[in-house]
Image: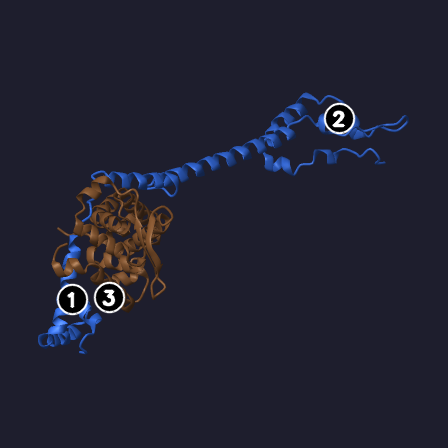
Chain colours: A blue, B brown
Amino acid sequence: MKCQDREKLFLFVQRILQADEADRVRRHLAGCTECARTVEEYRKLDSALDDWGVAEPSPWFDAKARARVAASGRKDSGFLGFGRVRTLAAGVAATVLIVGALVVFNHQKVAEINQPLSSLARPVTITAGQRVPAKTEALRKPLPPEEQLKMDENLSLLEDYEVVADFDALSELPQANSN
Amino acid sequence: MVVDSDLDLMLRVRQGDAGSFDELLRRYRTPLVKYFCRMVRDEAQAEDLAQEAFLRVYKARHRYRAEARFATWLYRIATNLALNAIRDAKGLGRQDGNGSNEDGEISFEFVDPKASVEQQLIETDRGRMIREAIEALPENQRAAVILHKYQDVDYRQIAGILKVSESAVKSLLFRAYETLRARLEPLVRGGQL
């Protein structure tokens, strides 16, 4: 090796050189007092640096570190499953709200359907001399008891929204301007 | 008894295992606190930064890649924290001899006004002289010397931590030791002050 290659000597002292290069330096040092002195200086410097001591961690270091991690876990993603429980709770709450809203909506629909036909029917204006349609006339008469019984039996159908949704009761009534 | 590797522990931390996190804490708390003590000097701040480093490890646990060595990853987080703390403190502390060297690296000596009285009392004259010489090194050289000399980190790992090439680490260490050799000459030649 070239004499006075200080970087190589430094790397030799620090044991950073490859094995073959370290062998070359070792052989060179055996016959070069100048380089041997430089190597000795680096070794002394390295040894002197050992005198810089610093403190050990305090006894409460671990507790503080764990507390910070736990606090962070509560804030965001959650440590040891706390976050998962919270996410699950939020999901359940959202589901309950959606189901509740659907129930209320359906209840209102059924209530509208269960209104008496009289409240839904549009008034039919009959001018003097005009013949009252037979169907309208028939609606005014009270039903015979056996017909009333049949209607009562069919009331359960009104609770079935699917059936009621497609049933247009007013389509059976004559329009005011018909005929 | 089989000792779990850092990698195994970290993979279990990813799955939420608190015991594995405790084991990593136990293994690395002392080296990490000492690293920060040497980087920022103030002991209270060093502990705070070390806790922050562990917190960041936990927060980034899902991003940890199994091929990355845990110690390298931890020291990279720690080094970023330390360098940021030093830069933040530049506005608070007194800076002596600040300026650029031939590589354009900024060198400054940061004198921490919060250094504890106890710390000042236990510090030997030799220790103070070494600390001041190392603190006066440019940031990258300072981190490289502390990692290599005091944390016993391999130069290949230092390259990963500082995100520079291995030959750049060798060069950083050599230049740092040359500067230290000149500044600490009385210590080296005379053996004492």
Q: Is residue A48 left or right of A70 when viewed as pictured?
A: left
Which residue corresponds to the image point at 12% horizontal and 57% vertical from the top-left? B191
Under mark 3, the amino acid is Phe
Under mark 1, the amino acid is Val
Residue assigned mark 1: A13
Estimate how packed mark 3 is, as few (under 14), some (14 to 19) or many (20 or more) residues with alpha carbons within 10 Å: many
Residue B175 drawn at (x, y percent) = 26, 65
Q: Dividing the image into 4 quarters, which one contains the C terminus of chain A? A: top right
Using the rendered image, report if marks 2 and 3 lie on a common chain.
no
Q: Is residue A10 above or below residue B94?
A: below
The chain letter under disc 2 is A
Q: Which disc, if any, is residue B164?
A: none
Estimate how packed mark 1 is, as few (under 14), some (14 to 19) or many (20 or more) residues with alpha carbons within 10 Å: some
Viewer-closest of B171 and B117: B117
Under mark 2, the amino acid is Leu
Helix, strand or loop for disc 3: helix
